[in-house]
Amino acid sequence: MMSDLRELYQEMILDHGRNPRHHCAMPEANRIANGFNQFCGDRLTLYLKLEQDKISLVSFQGSGCAISMASASLMSEILSGKMINEAENLFNNFHQLLTHDTTTLQQLPDLEKLAVFAGVKAYPARVKCATLAWHTLQAALKQTTEWVSTED
Amino acid sequence: MKIFDVKKIRADFPILQQKIKGKPLVYLDNAASTQKPYSVIERLDHYYRYENSNVHRGIHTLSELATEEFELSREKIQQFIHAKSFAEIIFVRGTTEAINLVAQTYGLSQIKAGDEIIISHMEHHANIVPWQILCSQTDAKLRIIPINEAGELLLEEYYRLLNPKTKLVAICHISNTLGTINPIKQIIDNAHANSPKTKVLIDGAQAVAHQKVDVQALDCDFYVFSGHKLFAPTGIGVLYGKQELLATLPPYQGGGSMITEVHLERSHYREPPYKFEAGTPHIAGAIGLGAAIDYLNQFNFDEIKQHEQQLLNYANKNLQSIQGLNLIGTAKEKTAILNFTVNDSRGMRIHGHDISDVLNTEAGVAVRAGQHCTMPLMQRFNVDSTVRASLAFYNNKEDIDALINGLQALKQLFR
């Protein structure tokens, strides 16, 4: 029973969903963007501290479902210290993992812990939850202060 | 009248025979939209196969047939809500359009700077935003009736809000989020006692499928509802307005059908209801709504209500077995809408979206999760997302059992 659901709600997702890391405002941030998922009302504010092309610090505030909170939490962990172009590659790979039927984890080794979201693929309505933080990241990197929506 | 037999009623709704992820569909999202019986589905099919044509236009057999059926539906609706005249029944796209129509005709022509419009804290966005738009157009003021913790209107506050500037009271018959049945007769009588110029609009979207509505007995000035929450197609709805009031209103949209004479400089408008029905209407939808009313007329609303109340009691009792479940909306007078949050064993709230996904996957249960188009109400209860199970007369105890089983699975997953 519940094998499908356990695939979606992996222990790591439940853990990060309940206790999101880097869940705070960042006074020293030099990029801030807001994300909004119209479908379920989730909102988050993403804070970045960029040092030239490097993302040195990431944090976020907001509330939402376990998937969206865990995604923002794990994203903030994996991005700290990454270069901007590495972050963009990660997002592309992450998006591919969630939306392409034939993509396997072996093809995307750099995803590291983000691999726990592989189960989201079976729940198309939840892809937006998992990608809200990443869409907001893109807005922050483009330095727009507009609300971004997952409706694109 | 037919004997009320849920098993037989369920057999009338083909979609209820469907499986979701291998489990029988348990449809508990009726406040969002109801399912359609065979008779409605077949009526649409029949219309498009044998009657499809434009109404009030061509002098040919099909056009006459379509017009006749379309107008017959209007009469069925008139009888269904006990309106005085067919001219009081205006076809619109749904509740939302009906409210916007009233705001932009009655509101824009009668409401001036400094006038007041009263709504309540439990309104659907469709009964908030059109009035905000009107207020920004006219400099009128929006006044809000507060509610108590159970989700009931504070009537004393309502009486205090009424004053000579009050031009309109717009209130829901039944709250889509809380299930509260508002004492609308009292609200209407007090508005009219305040001043003959205080008009009342009742948002009946959540009421028409669950209880008998008699607009003459209520004496409301406007009553609005959607077809798709009444077992009829989407895209069709009804604005009821008192004939003498409709006669004084300017048109809503301009176009074909709503005119008697058009010159390049000016036009003459038809009498209501046609004055408010510009363009080709949703003919099939209107005829489908008539078929849905025919279907409902087989039953007695007292029996429907009794059945739904029994299910509500059964659900209320069984939901108590789910630890950490908190019901929002516990009015004494309420319909079968169960709105709740669930905490995990550590006391942390599980998000509505997670709950509804588990219910769907684990138990085939369809519920609504989120804010239910009532953001101010959600803020009032300090919640950002809840789950709503809303019942119709085709639901049964097994549906409630499936909901409980799904919630137990949720508690296992989110320990």
Image (tube, rainbow, N blue to C red):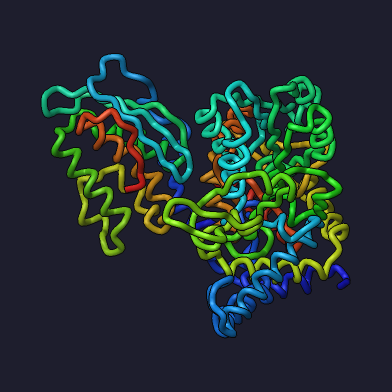
Residue B3 in the image: state x and y as whole percent. 88, 71
Residue A39 in the image: state x and y as whole percent. 45, 46
Determine whether B129 is above or below A107 in the image. Answer: above
Q: Is residue A93 among what the camera can see?
A: yes
- Kindly indicate the quadrant of the structure image that contains residue B319: top right
Q: Is residue B174 among what the camera can see?
A: no
Determine whether B383 is above or below A129 in the image. Answer: above
User: Which residue occupies the extreme top position in the image?
Assistant: A27
**Residue in the image at 74% along x and 61% along y:** B86
Relative side of B194 to B380, left or right: right
> In the rendered image, which quarter contains the C terminus of chain B?
top right
Residue toward you, B98 or B268: B268
Residue B26 in the image: state x and y as whole percent. 65, 61
> In the rendered image, which quarter contains the N terminus of chain B?
bottom right
- Kindly indicate the quadrant of the structure image that contains residue A35: top left
Residue toward you, B248 or B131: B248
**Total number of numbered discs in the rendering:** 0
Determine whether B69 is above or below A88 in the image. Answer: below
Relative side of A97 to B160, left or right: left
**Residue in the image at 34% along x and 30% along y:** A34
Relative side of A42 to B244, left or right: left
Residue toward you, B234 or B50: B50
Residue B245 in the image: state x and y as whole percent. 71, 44
Relative side of A152 to B364, left or right: left
**Residue in the image at 68% along x and 37% along y:** B170
User: Which residue occupies the extreme left position in the image?
Assistant: A52
Residue toward you, B133 or A87: B133
**Residue in the image at 46% along x and 36% along y:** A64
